[in-house]
Amino acid sequence: MRDVLEEDAHVRHRALAGKALVHVRIERQLLHVRVSADADEALAPTVARIPESLHHPEDPEHAPMRLHELLTDATDTIPADRQVLYRALAATERPHTLSAWLDKSAAPQMLRQLAGRAITHQTLDELPTGKTVEHLRSILVAAGILPTRDEHMMRLEQWVDAAIAERADPDEQHLLRRYALWHMLRRLRQRTRGADTTHNQYVLVRQHVRAAIGFLDWLAAHGLSLPDARQGNLDEWTASDNATLRRETRHFLRWAKKQKLTTLDAPAVRWDGPCGVIDTEARWDQARRLLHDETIKPEDRLAGLLVLLYAQWPAAISRLTIDHTCTSAGQVLIRLGDEPVVLPEPVAALALTVVANRRGKAAVGDPGTSPWLFPGGQPGRPISPYALTERLRHLGLQPARDRSTALFQLATDLPAAVLARMLGIHITVAVAWQRASAGDWTDYAAEISRRTYR
């Protein structure tokens, strides 16, 4: 016997047959087990005195003992499918952190509710939604108990199904199903190309579906359906107080007209370039500070430089993994689009530092094997775009404005095709920015095509 973990409250007074004396941890065994008086009478003298410190929350064995009790079944053993979870949680670096999680988090109670049931995504979906169940899910995924799943896409599908089911008109249900499932969600899957859906993408699709529902409700309130509506009705809606989410509603109407479901015209508003201030001097001042100010965390410096120098959204930065960086022929490269970019010094050294020392904020259940370049607060998951944006704001950056400034300058200097491949943006976006910056390379490309070589 190596360690006595828990003494029965009455062990010093009498030992009855079948009465548990102590919890002990036996050498070379995984589980903490109970020893009964009639199971091993020779052990009783050994446990006549139990260290009082064992019962104190600060004792290193206190949290593992409680975790063992949480996961054991009726036979006082941890089932095979819970042993991996036990090891993942027991490996928490600081025992008092695990104790605090057991005391304050609602996750342990959820695990008790799942006692005797297989742990699957479906069983977790049956629990009350919220941050607690999602954190528990992330622990289970990081431990390898559950497979990875696109949570935002799953919640989006569930929300769309519920929103469609609330419609009383079968024709409206069919219309919304075509728009939401066959158009919006299919287009989203094509854009993510197997990557997880971001929170912003989740919100954007919901806004588009809500806009379609809102316009259909307005038509119904005026005794109209989508095929019956005329341009004057659309003008009336536009002038009304109910005209919210106008851009998203116009998108729905353009799709409906393309599908020959309406005759309404809702032209798209042409983008004429950034409406904010393009301050290139401020951009370079901020970049110089992040390049050389070693009082700022390396991961924050790198994230800020990816915005300022390479026009990356925080959402795109948050999804970078260590596989997006590599070294070749003495150079450090990062892949932001289809083509890797060579990082200059000192950005290259900064990137290697971040790769070598990255550490998330997950205190419980993090196996330390996260592939993310910017780990987040949940085990095995990246930092959220919102959290990363806030960290950059604390440094004095305004990510949306600073990205526009960087993209404006890059579009002046590079052809659209190179810009798209290098930064991971769509070619139409690259062309629009190039025209807005007056850096149209069309004439240059035409000149190159006319050259003759001897």
Image (tube, grey):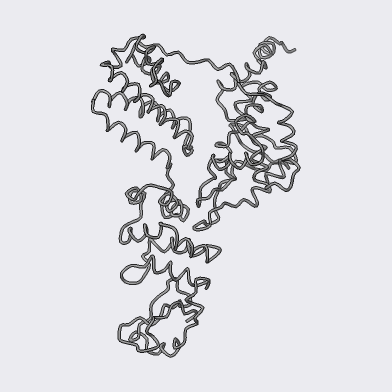
In this picture, is 248 found above or below 125?
Answer: above
Where does residue 138 sit, x and y in percent of width and height?
45, 51
Q: Quadrant of residue 256?
A: top left
Q: Is residue 34 above or below residue 243?
A: below
**Point 41% across, 68% down: residue:** 68
Image quadrant containing the C terminus: top right
Q: Which quarter of the figure has residue 69?
A: bottom left
Q: For this rendering, which residue is in front, 53 or 189? A: 53
Where in the figure is residue 333, as x and y percent of width and height?
A: 67, 39
Judged left or right of residue 126, residue 25 is: right
| Residue 399, x across and y down, in percent | 61, 34
- Residue 261 vs residue 444: left or right? left
Q: Is residue 44 above or below residue 366?
A: below
Q: Does residue 164 appear left or right of residue 432 in this picture?
A: left
Percent x, y for residue 161? 31, 34
Q: Residue at x 62, y 23 (%)?
A: 276
